[in-house]
Amino acid sequence: MIRFENVYKEYPGDNEALHDVDLHIKRGEFVFVLGPSGAGKSTFLKLILREESPTRGHVWVDGVDLADLKEKQIPYLRRKIGVVFQDFRLIPTMTVYDNVAFALRVTDVSEDRIRERVPIVLKLVGLTHKADAYPPTLSGGEQQRVAVGRALAHSPELLIADEPTGNVDPAMSLEMMKLLVAANNVGATVVVVTHEQDMARRMGKRIILLEEGRVVTDGKPGQGKGGARG
């Protein structure tokens, strides 16, 4: 699903964000990308979303070399990807239903399809009873669920969670992980970018650890670099 081949990313001022990153995330995997601030996690995400291009090397998503994409093709790439942001980015003047529907409306999905899809998503994240509520009236955990639902609305092949537990307590962190596992169980490739090593290790999933732009370990807890790759 995602392949980095000898990827370097350099910014002006001799600032190297990624150094010779070489990895493969298979379709259907659940992967944590760990690292402290400045390790290269944000650049890693920007390359996948084609917000940035590598200085050297190649990035593939769903079999497509992103270097070959024309500007007009980038939105079609991003329609395959659902993103859960750390700050949720919900629209406070829209209901829960419309926040989820918004992800479909911006990609010109028909209203008939929206009426069919949104209730399914709300049921998946346990918010059917909150469809008419507005984000400011929701608990933090419920807002978190709306954010996941919106990311899942268009049945993405790839789901990315960017520091999804950075602003929530441990109980909500666990709830978020359960939602992401549920998405993975129905076929989505899940990539969680975080600095929370303890949580990632408890999940027992594959961990890619970045330090100073380099992959220093890659595998499940207890395995060495390359232990879960293929």
Image (spheres, rainbow, N blue to C red):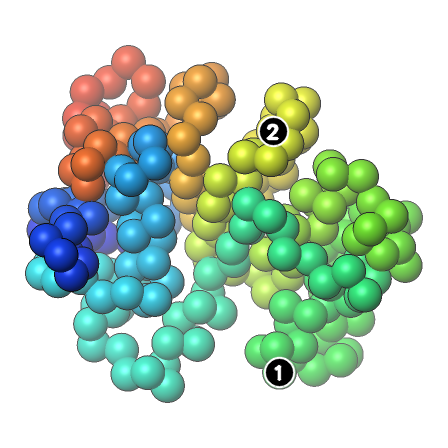
N-term mark: 1 or 2: 1
Is residue 195 placed above or below 102 in the rendered structure? above
Specify whether 158 is left or right of 93.
left
Residue 50 visible to the viewer: yes
Is residue 94 placed above or below 28 in the rendered structure? below
Number of other residues with Cα within 10 Å of mark 1, as a class: few under 14, some 14 to 19, many 20 or more: few
Specify whether 44 is left or right of 122.
left
Front one among 210 and 114: 210
Q: Position of residue 105 (x, y in %)?
A: 67, 77
Front one among 199 and 35: 35
Q: How many marks?
A: 2
Q: Position of residue 48 (x, y in %)?
A: 32, 58
What secondary structure is found at the residue carrying circle 1? Answer: loop
Specify whether 204 is left or right of 23.
right
Please name the residue shown 19% across and 36% down the image.
212
Please name the residue shown 27% across and 78% down the image.
69
* Amino acid type, residue under disc 2 in the picture: Ser
Q: Position of residue 161 (x, y in %)?
A: 49, 45
Is residue 64 placed above or below 176 in the rendered structure? below
Is residue 176 placed above or below 66 in the rendered structure? above
Query: Label 2 belongs to which residue?
Result: 173
Number of other residues with Cα within 10 Å of mark 2, as a class: few under 14, some 14 to 19, many 20 or more: some
* Amino acid type, residue under disc 1 in the picture: Asp
Tell me whether the residue at label 1 lies in contact with that at label 2, contact meaning CB atoms closer than 8 angstroms: no
What secondary structure is found at the residue carrying circle 2? Answer: helix
Residue 62 visible to the viewer: no
Query: Label 1 belongs to which residue?
Result: 108
Q: Position of residue 223 (x, y in %)?
A: 24, 18
Outermost residue, front direction?
Answer: 13
Label 1 – label 2 distance at C-alpha: 33 Å
Query: Which quarter shows the C terminus?
Result: top left
Query: Which quarter shows the N terminus?
Result: bottom left
